[in-house]
Amino acid sequence: MYLGLTRFLVLCLLIWMSSAECLAQQTAAPDAALSESLSEEVNDPTATLTQVQIQEFFTPSQYGTNAQPNTLQGRFVLAILPHGPLPLAQIVRPTFALVTIPRNKGASTRTEFGDSQLLDLFVMPRSMTEGIDFRWAIGPYFVFPTATSKSAGRGAWEAGPAAAFRYRPIPGLLISGLIQQATSFAYTSPDRTPVTRLTFQPMLSYQLGHGWYVRSSDATWTFNLRRGTSTTIPLSAGLGKVWKLSNGASINGSVAGEWMVYRQFAPRAEQFTLKFQMTLLFPSVEL
């Protein structure tokens, strides 16, 4: 089922690319400039840009099983203007997942709801980094045990700090990252294992012009900090484009491949994953 959905998403992306190119030939120079700006912001974890994301992660090859797992992920990124006594912009990012997971070492799978996440970042003012094109944000991170089966989630309430940064050393090149740390404090059943986990998502992107960009931003490094728990370090490479729509919104589409380059104490982990993302961007929407 999800293989067909993957092909459908790719087809939609190709259709958008074709139609958007025709539309781009009729747009004015300010629209092109806006697309260039947005193509950088979509790769910036500290950008106050309201978004609605749909991502699909299809894994044709996984260690420890012959199955082909899949994750369909929905994410909202809400940009909130400074309010009250704290003069800081805020980024609220809830994430929900529908996961197709292996039943065993064979090829059979089943589909379940996964755990949900909430990231809340407060963006520091530019005056704190005056003189360099650098911005950072900090805030809390939460994981909620919404999975509908034991193997689809960790069965734990988790919380911890998070931080993001972005640095532009030269025009067109963006170096950024997102760090999240979660520690479990309550469980859905007494047999659940305590969790202390650190994730780091390194992001590197370069603007090619006309809304196009290349990036290595889709891989997340995971370090489970308890003794004998898993560590995985993948790398990714991808291509994307932002198109300006006539109603003031924009569309970002990207395709990336991810390869596992290091794993420890992880008998079942992704070996190769294809990642497809389609995002509606609303640059004028701020709460």
Image (cartoon, rainbow, N blue to C red):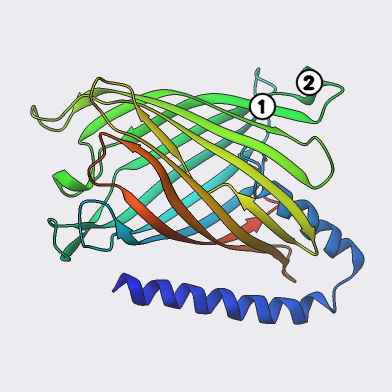
Q: Where, quadrant-wise, is the C terminus in this rendering? A: top right
| Residue 37 location (% of width, % of height) | 78, 52
Q: Is residue 46 visible?
A: no
Q: Where, quadrant-wise, is the N terminus in this rendering? A: bottom left
| Residue 266 location (% of width, % of height) | 26, 39
Q: Quadrant of residue 122?
A: top right
Cα distance in 3D space between marks 2 and 1: 9 Å
Residue placed at 85% from the left, 79% from the top? 26
View extreme (right): residue: 29
Q: Is residue 208 visible?
A: yes
Residue placed at 37% from the left, 49% from the top? 96
Q: Quadrant of residue 34?
A: bottom right
**Which residue carries the number 1 mark?**
136
Question: Earlier along the polypeptide chain: callout 2 or callout 1?
Answer: 2
| Residue 194 location (% of width, % of height) | 21, 24
Tag 2–tag 1 contact (CB < 8 Å): yes
Residue placed at 67% from the left, 40% from the top? 47
Q: Give the left or right position of residue 70, taking residue 150 as reference.
A: right
Kind of residue at badge 1: Trp
Kind of residue at badge 2: Thr
Q: What label sits on residue 129 in the rendered view?
A: 2
